[in-house]
Amino acid sequence: MKESATEQNKMGVMPITRLLLSISLPMMFAMLIQSLYNIVDSIFVAKISENALTAVSLAFPIQSIMIAMATGTGVGINALVSMRLGQQEQDKVNKSALNGLFLACCSFVLFFVVGALCMPAYMHQQTSDPEIAESGIIYLRIVTTMSFGLFGVITFDRLLQSTGRTVLTMISQCAGAVFNCVFDPILIFGIGPFPRLGIAGAAYATVSGQILSCILSWQFNIRYNKEIQFSLKGFRPSLSIIRQIYKVGVPSILLGSINSVTSYTMNMILGTFSSTAIAVYGIYFKLISFIFLPVFGLNNGIVPIVAYNFGACNKARIYKTIRTGIKFAFCIMACGTILFELIPARLLQLFNASDHMLAIGVPALRIIAPSFLGAAVSISLSSVFQALRHAFYSMIISFVRQLIVLLPCAYLLSRTGSIHNIWWCFLIAEVSALGMTFFFMGRIRRTVLNTLEG
């Protein structure tokens, strides 16, 4: 128990900058590797054909919903477990973790059924090109029906993060990402004894990497995560705990699902110009993962620190965590903005970009890039809302950004007949979201933080 207390107390006593970096850097590194794997995956798919790359872009909304379900539930688990640790309630810590694992299993079953039955209708609704549709169906059926690795690793990693063992999450994530990067070309192009599987090879490499990460993270929890006792004896799902998890998790799930709706609708809007425009949009998402995922890794460090100190009523440490997190996030986003402004053509050429793709993509990346700076603040404060059990604010901001502002703006700008005008919708939407974020942070300060005694 002495070791357990030491691990918990660092959330309340270690200097914030050192604490945030010690928790976040492994996750940021893991997220960076994950983003590189996403980029490498698309680079190899692009070598098959532009149609294959377009098919993966059209498949992205479904993958986004799966990730949203897994990460949103994980956010709820992380926040609840961290708060129970801060309150020293061991029995509730254990029950929260086990109910989280139960929800991960339920999510997998749901997407197995959806993947087995619904993919043809989904793809044919988005494209009339039979080659693109068939490639998308093959890819999506594999990643949905074998998604138990995805749901498992995200849940197990969140449990490790809630107790500060982020180095172990880095190891599990990196192992899966490296496996994917190695086996992508092997399975796509049939290198050595392996058959040439094309786009199916990319999907099999992806799910195999997720399964490997899941196995490692499961073992790390069993062996090293002593603050949580994993015993299924007498376990029954608790509606009360599930409600508490989803009170924080549902807004995050909806947040990710909104991204899926946005991607789907943007694909429809851009498809009225050309399939190349859809491919550019898909590349954009892969590239921004290189910038945004490390920020999400940083925010995964913010959540348990803020949640723990909220449970301990330590207001000063909460404010210090918020300020430090925003500074680091802004620096990361500034670097991404500079890259998009200075070398957009080189970034696109990683994906075998044609002249037509460059003509569309270079202006797009340069127009969108400044919105990253506002996103740094919005994303950081959204993680604070989640940790303080006001994740509903994050959902509202996302609705404003993507459904109320971005998509209508994209449609209206598309009516001008110039595809270059469409990309301004991202900047307009981010400015709107930033204003909403400041408004909600002011309310949180008055109604929650200022009432704490610490």
Image (cartoon, rainbow, N blue to C red):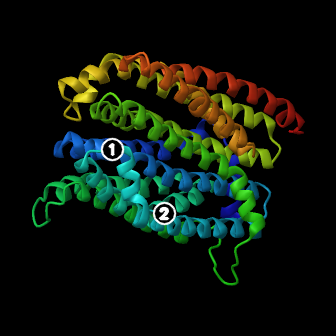
Q: Which residue is mark 1?
A: 127
Numbered tag placed on residue 64 in the rendering: none
Labels 2, 1: front one: 1
Q: Is residue 390 left or right of residue 128?
A: right
Circle 1: residue type:
Thr
Q: Quadrant of residue 147?
A: bottom left
Circle 2: residue type:
Phe
**Tags 2 and 1 touching, CB below 8 Å:** no
> Residue 81: x and y, percent?
69, 58
Q: Quadrant of residue 314?
A: top right
Q: Quadrant of residue 448?
A: top right
**Above or below, 305 relative to 349:** below
In the foreground, 208 or 417: 417
Residue 1 shows up from this direction: no
Total marks placed: 2
Q: Which residue is mark 2?
A: 111
> Residue 292: x and y, percent?
47, 35
> Residue 295: x and y, percent?
51, 36
Residue drawn 39% across the image and 19% down it:
338
**Above or below, 7 relative to 319:** below
Residue 44 shows up from this direction: yes
Residue drawn 55% across the image and 64% down it:
107
Of labels 2 and 1, earlier in sequence is 2
In the rendered image, the residue lying farthest to the left is 192
Q: Secondary structure at mark 1?
A: loop
In the foreground, 116 or 142: 116
